[in-house]
Amino acid sequence: MLNQLYDRYLLPYLVDIATGFAPLERQRKNIVPKARGRVLEIGFGTGRNLTFYEPSRVTEIVGLEPAEPMRRLARKRIAKLGIGVRLLDAFAENIPYEDGSFDTVVMTFTLCSVLDPSAALLEMRRVLGQDGRLLFCEHGRSPHRSVNRWQKRLTPVWKKVAGGCHLDRDVGRLLEEAGFECLELERFYASPLRVWTWITRGEAVPSLRSFNPRPDPRAFCARKGKSGGM
Ligand SMILES: C[S@@+](CC[C@H](N)C(=O)[O-])C[C@H]1O[C@@H](n2cnc3c(N)ncnc32)[C@H](O)[C@@H]1O
């Protein structure tokens, strides 16, 4: 009960504040303006990327976000900015679009929270069209042992208060295992808060090498106990 109240009324505001943290916010302008054509943004959150899209390059933005409290704040931001966005109640592990539907998939500070990051990335790969690009900026597992040790220690508690956020996911490895090839890849600490801000940022395309087939979305839905909404 308290958990539900927290997730519904407090968490969205806390996430909005945390994702507006200046060192993270700065990363957006390095990645989001590269989006072009038909864009799918995964884990749209409260819509913090919206002001960074380049209107002349983008024809449509679909914002996938499974949590209604997040969509509620996103709707306010969309209305305030007057930017056209189609908000979609769905999980990244089961994207309700045909293969090859998008020119760009944008994912910022989201892979840490999804239940099954490998399945989510395979879905992103599937919905990208020929010449499609994944633009990503994620925090995750530091290569430095002392930082990583703290990431591992803190994650079990942190994920309970931070909407399922894992501090210790290896973003580069997950991308590679899902069959993405990085055209650009930068890794760095975005702030002195090293446990939270080891950033992996770049641009990837589906690799030509063979890779795992699409996961069965029904398996994910069965685990999640529902087909949409949080
Ligand atoms: C830390 S927030 C980041 C929001 C936004 N991408 C940003 O850069 O500000 C993570 C978002 O991922 C969403 N999320 C969690 N699980 C998800 C899933 N399985 N599929 C898609 N989005 C998910 C959460 O609801 C939340 O809005």
Image (cartoon, grey):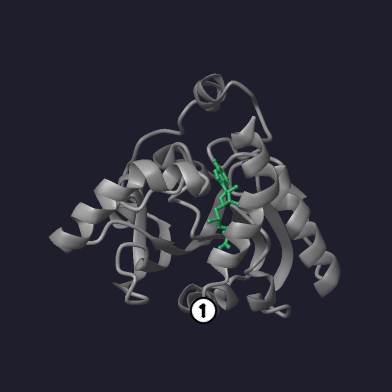
Q: Quadrant of residue 68?
A: top right
Q: Quadrant of residue 48?
A: bottom right
> Viewer-proximal residue, 153 or 86?
153
Name the residue furthest front. 2
Query: Is 185 above or below relative to 67?
Result: below
| Residue depicted at 72% across the width and 80% down the height | 56
Name the residue furthest left. 145
Query: Is 206 above or below relative to 196?
Result: above
Does the closest atom of ligand 1 sit within 8 Å of the Cβ of label 1? no
Identify the image quadrant of the C terminus.
top right
> Viewer-proximal residue, 208 or 74?
74
Identify the image quadrant of the N terminus.
top right
In the rendered view, does 185 fall on the left or right side of 150?
right
In the rendered view, does 217 fall on the left or right side of 173?
right
Residue 6 location (% of width, % of height):
63, 43
Give amino acid for label 1. Ala
In the rendered view, does 143 fall on the left or right side of 69?
left
| Residue depicted at 71% across the width and 41% down the height | 89
Quick check: can you spot residue 97? no
| Residue depicted at 45% across the width and 30% down the height | 215
* Helix, strand or loop under label 1: helix
Residue 83 location (% of width, % of height):
80, 70
> Viewer-proximal residue, 184 or 88?
88
Quick check: can you spot residue 112? yes
| Mark 1 surroundings within 10 Å by alpha-carbon count, few (fewer than 14), some (14 through 19), many (20 or more) | few
Residue 198 location (% of width, % of height):
32, 66
Query: Is 7 above or below relative to 216?
Result: below
| Residue depicted at 59% across the width and 78% down the height | 33
Mark 1 lies on residue? 22
Residue 205 location (% of width, % of height):
43, 60
